[in-house]
Image (spheres, rainbow, N blue to C red):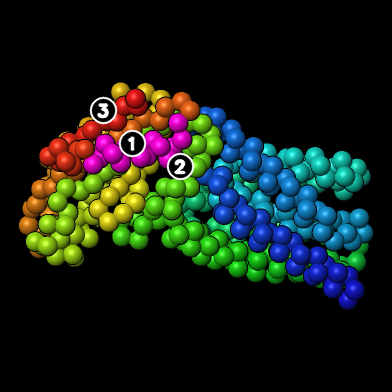
Amino acid sequence: MYACKECTMVSLLANIGIMFFAIYFYLRSNFGSPNQDNEKISYFIKCILLEVLVGIVLLSFSTVILGIRFDFRFLMFCFSAKYIDWKITSSSILLLGILRFVWDNNDIAQINLVVSILLAVTLPLIAHYTKDKLNELTQLLVLVTYALIPTIVFTNHLIADKKLVLVICSILVTSGYAATYVMHYFITDLYKLIVSASTDHLTALKNVRTFNNDLMDVEREKKAVTLAVIDIDYFKDYNDSFGHDNGDVLLKQMAQVFNELSAFDTDFYRIGGEEFAVIIDTPNQRDAEAFIHDLQEIVAHRRFSTTSGDPVSVTISVGVAHNRTGETLKKTLKRADVALYKAKKGGRNQVIVSFPH
């Protein structure tokens, strides 16, 4: 029994290591948040493939006791149900259940397939209905408890040695809860680090590093986009008059204006002191230009305020460039910069669109 216990612990520790790696890979990868239908399909396929691959690896490091495989696939399903789309969770559970059946092709594998169908239907439902009723950690523990029940029931039914059943179930429950607790905080802390690295600390907009990465993604996907560069007019004079603290407040308020606006697939970035950039993901150039003109008008008529509550008015100058076929986004951005320079030299508080020669 000691050897069995030792073997099970080594296997489950290997499973925990695999889970940590999978979580890290998922959070660090650019799966992103899909917006368009084709992106959603690609996102679903990538996530399902990742979960199935991780599940296969977990199966490979499972402990087999009297024909029963023990691993942490159930834990992966719980985290998937909590943090990822239910369609991905259900598909992954079903696919892994089928693969497990093909892998072993015995009575226990048949039981596992039935359990997989049950979990595929019920686990996402439980995650959905407990989402707003429990805090994140408690919800995860509820999901893990539910996912463990079939394993405990069938282990007790299939193994005659009840002392062995107690040892196995104790290890599964204890390690499952402990792993859930640690991985929850691992995900939370890692996500904060990733967001911090990609976000401007003052305005909470995406930063210049993310802007450059997103430009590379857009170029790789060959999307038709419009780039705009925005500069707050006379920001240096504003800082001199009201102080740098008020300058920071203005930047935050400007970011709030940007966040309030939504059109197409639009992303705002802070790329310099008082300079911002926009990527507008639409092939319709007129709509993109109309959006930028509306933005400029909204800012011009917006009443901003100082730390003492005094109302102030500011304006912005904007340079716009549409990416043309065969042109690198670096050149498109350069044209937007030149257009911004012309807007500032031409009196500010205006939008200049750069047209390719």
The stretch drawn in magenta includes residue 332: yes
The residue to which callout 3 is attached is 290
Residue at 67% from the left image edge and 59% from the top image edge? 21
Disc 1 crowd, CA 10 A, few/some/many (<14, 14-19, 20+) = many
**Badge 2 or badge 3: first in the primary sequence:** 2
The part of the image, by quadrant, that contains residue 249 is bottom left
Position above or below: 12 against 264: below
Q: Is residue 188 visible?
A: no
Disc 3 vs disc 1: which is toward the camera?
A: 1
Q: Amino acid at mark 2?
A: Leu
Q: Which mark is residue 227?
A: none
Q: Amino acid at mark 3?
A: Ala
**Foreground residue among 104 and 171:** 104
Q: Is residue 327 visible?
A: yes
**Foreground residue among 313 and 239:** 239
Q: Secondary structure at mark 3?
A: helix
Disc 2 vs disc 3: which is toward the camera?
A: 2
Disc 2 vs disc 1: which is toward the camera?
A: 1
Q: Quadrant of the N terminus?
A: bottom right
Q: Position of residue 132 (x, y in %)?
A: 45, 52
The residue range painted magenta reads 327-341
Q: Which mark is residue 215?
A: 2
User: Is 140 situated left or right of 269 in this image?
Assistant: right
Residue at 65% from the left image edge and 66% from the top image edge? 179
Residue at 66% from the left image edge and 55% from the top image edge? 22
The residue to which callout 1 is attached is 335
Disc 2 crowd, CA 10 A, few/some/many (<14, 14-19, 20+) = some
User: Is 128 situated left or right of 172 in this image?
Assistant: left
